[in-house]
Image (cartoon, helix red, strand yellow):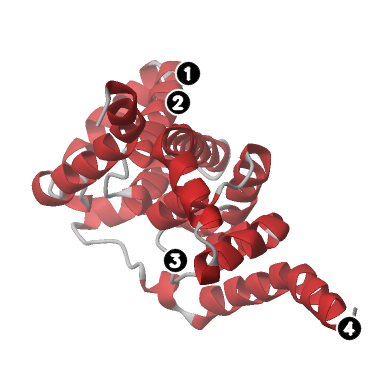
Amino acid sequence: MDRRGLLRRLPLAVVVIAALVGLVFLRDFFSFQALAAQADRLTAIRDAHFATAATLFVLFYAAMVGLSLPGATLATLTGGFLFGLFPGLILNLAGATAGAVAVFAAVRMGIGAEVARKLTSGGGGPARLVAAIRRNEWSALLIMRFLPVVPFFAANLIPAFVGVRFWPYALTTAVGILPGAVVLTALGRGLGAVIASGEAPDLSVLRSPALVLPLLGLAVLAAIPMIWRVLRRKEG
């Protein structure tokens, strides 16, 4: 393999290695216990240097998402804990979206474009799937974001391998993660009391019908334009 080929594969290799290192060695670092231990220090930094703290939080969140490290849920809770619902929600959306866009762009410009070409030129089911996603970019991307069963890192990488366009990806990422970000940021506001009590946050709401069913409903709404196009093609 030539040097150019190695460079094209480098972004994905970095993400995979970072994700594995994070999963094996950094799980304790990205834990509620670690946050609780540093809560007083973090709030002191926020109170003394609010703008700097907000900027560093966004950069840290973006780097964590861009490298597919574990702890996105904890980071969103932390945003609510440190900055409240507002501007915490804005900071959470900025960090998560920036990281997702960064990893998408890096992989897309690297091996992602090559994979997309191979899938398209190979014909058969993969080529038809790629063509269908490209015809329905907005719907397909929103469905991936809204469906609770699609991991966040997977929804960041899959579009890079099927050749979706940049702006649909970026905008649907921001819109698609908004509902979950609102819930987690709101929960994060109450972390101070949880930490003071020595307990762990109750995240069962993330699996409750009250949250899952609306997300499924949004996924169905996002699928309507795609279903309509399919029906029109069959009628034609």
**Residue 97 position (above or below residue 178):** above
On the image, which quarter does residue 168 sit in? Answer: top right
Give the class, few, some or many, for how many residues have Cα within 10 Å of label 1's Cα (few <14, many ≥20).
few
Q: Nearer the viewer, residue 57 or 26?
A: 26
The disc, 3 or 2, on the residue closer to the chain's N-terminal end is 2
Relative vertical location of residue 114 with respect to residue 188 in this rendering, above or below: above
Dot 3 surroundings within 10 Å: few (below 14), some, or many (20 or more)? few
Q: Which residue is mark 1?
A: 51
For the residue marked with disc 1, what is the amino acid?
Ala
Which of 205 and 132 lies nearest the eye of the viewer? 132
State the image coordinates of residue 36 (x, y, percent, origin top left).
21, 45
59 relative position to 211: left or right: left
Of the image marks 4 and 1, the number of the one nearer the N terminus? 1
Determine which residue is flagged by label 4. Answer: 235
Q: Are marks 1 and 2 in contact (CB under 8 Å)?
A: yes
Name the residue beneath numbered marker 3.
Answer: 150
Task: Compute the Cα span from label 3 to label 2.
Answer: 29 Å
* Other residues around mark 2 within 10 Å, as few (<14) / some (14–19) / many (≥20): some
Nearer the N terminus, badge 3 or badge 4? 3
Question: Residue 196: where, in percent of width, then height?
Answer: 24, 51
What amino acid is found at the position of numbered circle 4 in the picture?
Answer: Glu
* Residue 29 visible in the shown view: no
Q: Which mark is residue 180?
A: none
Q: Amino acid at mark 3?
A: Val
Left or right of residue 219, residue 28 in this image: left
